[in-house]
Each structure stands twice: as C-alpha cells, then as structure tokens.
Image (cartoon, rainbow, N blue to C red):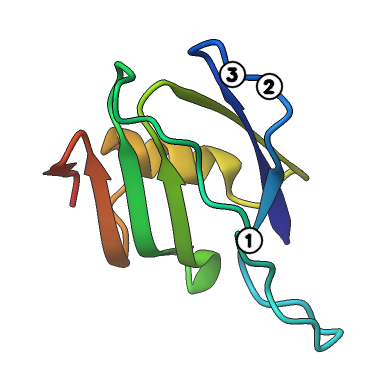
Amino acid sequence: MRFQALRASVAGHAPDTPIHTVSLGAPPTTGATPPTQTNPPPDTSSREGAPVDVRSLSISFGGKAVLDNLDLTVAPGEFIAIVGRSGCGKSTLLRAIMGLVRPDSGEIHVDRASAR
C-alpha cells in the first residue's frame, strides 16, 4: 500500500512542488522498486516551524506490518497532505509522530528532539 505526501511551502513559494510517494506496508508484488524522492526539498533555513524527521520507521499490530521501514522529512514551514487508501497507515504515522504509538523500530525526531 502507499500514501502520497503532497508538499506545499508557505513562505511565498509556489505550491506546485512535487508529489512524493512513500511506500507503506509490504512492497508491491509486481516487482516494482519502491519510489524514491528525486527532487531535493526547498531551502527552508529561514522558515518558522518544527522540522519532522522519520527514519526507518516500522510499526506492526498483531503481527501485521502497517508501516515498514518508512522515511519521511518535513521541513520547517512546509505543509504536507497525507493521502491514501483506508488502512494504509496514514493515521498510524501521525499517531507515531505525536508519540501516541510506540514504533517497533526506527526513529522520529520533531524539532531535533527524539520522539522514540
């Protein structure tokens, strides 16, 4: 399963930055490789807000992997929308970032502080 993170900056930059797709759960069975981020994020060094950095995040419930080795970076001042089918891990990701769900493995850093 997959969700898409649509990125749009708020400091006067155009909201037409690329859509980044992140694989959630088991890899596709078609033999396709997981998508990767090909465009670097915009320079956000002067923007306000808390950066979010998720590295190698894995979460499972009852032996079923919901998030599997997920990487996601959100720069300060950047908005993203997480879009995907029911059950693909969108809410689980947000709960983990807020510290409401403990990951099986991986790290979550919000504003340079670890949430794990």
Q: Residues within 10 Å of mark 2 (few under 14, many from 20)?
A: some
Q: What separation in Å lies between label 2 and label 3 (alpha carbons)?
A: 6 Å
Q: Is residue 95 above or below residue 31?
A: above
Tell me the residue that label 3 is attached to.
13
Q: Secondary structure at mark 3?
A: loop
- Report the amino acid beneath label 2: Pro
Precedes in sequence: disc 1 or disc 2: 2
Tell me the residue that label 1 is attached to.
38
- Report the amino acid beneath label 3: His
* Image disc number at residue 15: 2
Horizontal and vertical percent position of residue 70: 48, 62
Q: Residues within 10 Å of mark 3 (few under 14, many from 20)?
A: few
| Numbered label tally | 3
Precedes in sequence: disc 3 or disc 1: 3
Residue plotted at (46% across, 52% down): 72
Q: Secondary structure at mark 2?
A: loop
Q: What separation in Å lies between label 3 and label 1 (alpha carbons)?
A: 19 Å
Q: Residues within 10 Å of mark 1 (few under 14, many from 20)?
A: few
Residue 42 falls left or right of residue 112: right
Nearer the viewer's eye, disc 2 or disc 3? Answer: 3
Horizontal and vertical percent position of residue 16: 73, 28
Residue plotted at (38% across, 30% down): 44
Q: Quadrant of residue 60?
A: bottom left
Disc 2 + disc 3, Cβ < 8 Å: yes
